[in-house]
Image (spheres, helix red, strand yellow):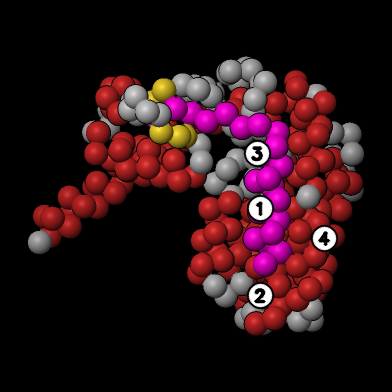
Amino acid sequence: MQATMRKEDEGGSQTVRALLQLREMILAGVLPAGKRIAEPAVADVTGISRTPIRAALIRLQEEGLIEPIPSGGYRVRAFSVADIRDAIEVRGVLEGLAARRAAERGITRALLERMRTCVSQIDDLLAPGPLDGARFAGYVDANARFHDALAMAAGSDLIQRQVERANTLPFASANGFVQVQSVQPDAARTLMIANAQHAAVVEAISQREGARAEALMREHARMAHHNLERVLEHPNVIDLVPGGCLIEGAPAEAS
């Protein structure tokens, strides 16, 4: 029994390893859009057996990064601008739902304080002064923690899973285009506006204002549309977007 459990644990860890390695190769452009992915070839490159690789490929298909092809195996997906806009909208709808449910059902004091702490930390990071690499990395971390807490605040495993799934597409995640903001001259101002929206959402949830919390969160997600436009207008920043090489018309490999 213990030997069987150990074997299952090892298989699971190998699947995770294969998943992470394949996802990184796709997002970095090592496996470009349209590239066929076959289990034997991946096994040769990664040194991982085919069973966990097969499981990882199924996961990547569920995430939307690859798609099956009639001749066998999978190929890396390309994403149109319309696809990306739709993915952003889906995240906004789901996070808006999470915010509304949190306000309507109420959340624990601990979770509410966790969200407020993220807002406060971001305010500190965006205090007057140069927005250097360390401060920006701190923003990315606190921003991710805020959005994770919001998904939890819905009080629904189903909603939380769907939000997490929406975030698997690199363009749709809360930090998907945030690196693009870092090189803009108005970076600090834009991030301050985003954090003011965070604070407003927390306040709406605490006041049990479901409709307001939902509207605020959906508007917050739409900031990613502006970042997408900046990428389209300035292709030289495509490397700052995880998976940017998968956008139709983008270079096949990140430079």
Q: Decide: marks 1, 2 in contact (CB < 8 A)?
A: no
Residue under label 3, please give it.
Answer: 83
CA distance for labels 3 and 2: 27 Å
CA distance for labels 4 and 1: 19 Å
Taking the magenta stretch, the answer to whether it contains residue 78 is yes
Sequence-first tag of 1 and 2: 1
Q: Which mark is residue 197?
A: 4
Q: Decide: marks 1, 3 in contact (CB < 8 A)?
A: no
10 Å crowding of disc 3: few (<14), some (14-19), many (20+): some
Residue under label 1, please give it.
Answer: 90
Q: Decide: marks 4, 1 in contact (CB < 8 A)?
A: no
Describe residue 51's horizontal placement relative to residue 1 as left or right.
Answer: right
The three-letter amino acid code for the residue at tag 4 is Gln
What secondary structure do most residues of the magenta stretch adopt?
A: helix
Sequence-first tag of 4 and 2: 2
The residue drawn where x is 28% and y is 40% is 52
Q: Which mark is residue 17?
A: none
Describe residue 167's horizontal placement relative to residue 119 as left or right.
Answer: left
Residue under label 2, please give it.
Answer: 101
The three-letter amino acid code for the residue at tag 3 is Asp
Task: Read off the magenta span.
Answer: 74-97
Vertical arrangement, residue 51 with respect to residue 247, above or below: below
Q: Secondary structure at mark 4?
A: helix
Quarter of image, res 92: bottom right
Sequence-first tag of 4 and 1: 1
The three-letter amino acid code for the residue at tag 2 is Arg
- Quarter of the figure with the C terminus: top right
Q: Nearer the viewer, residue 218 or 203?
A: 218
Quarter of image, res 111: bottom right
Image location of residue 214, percent across then percent down: 75, 67
Q: Decide: marks 4, 3 in contact (CB < 8 A)?
A: no
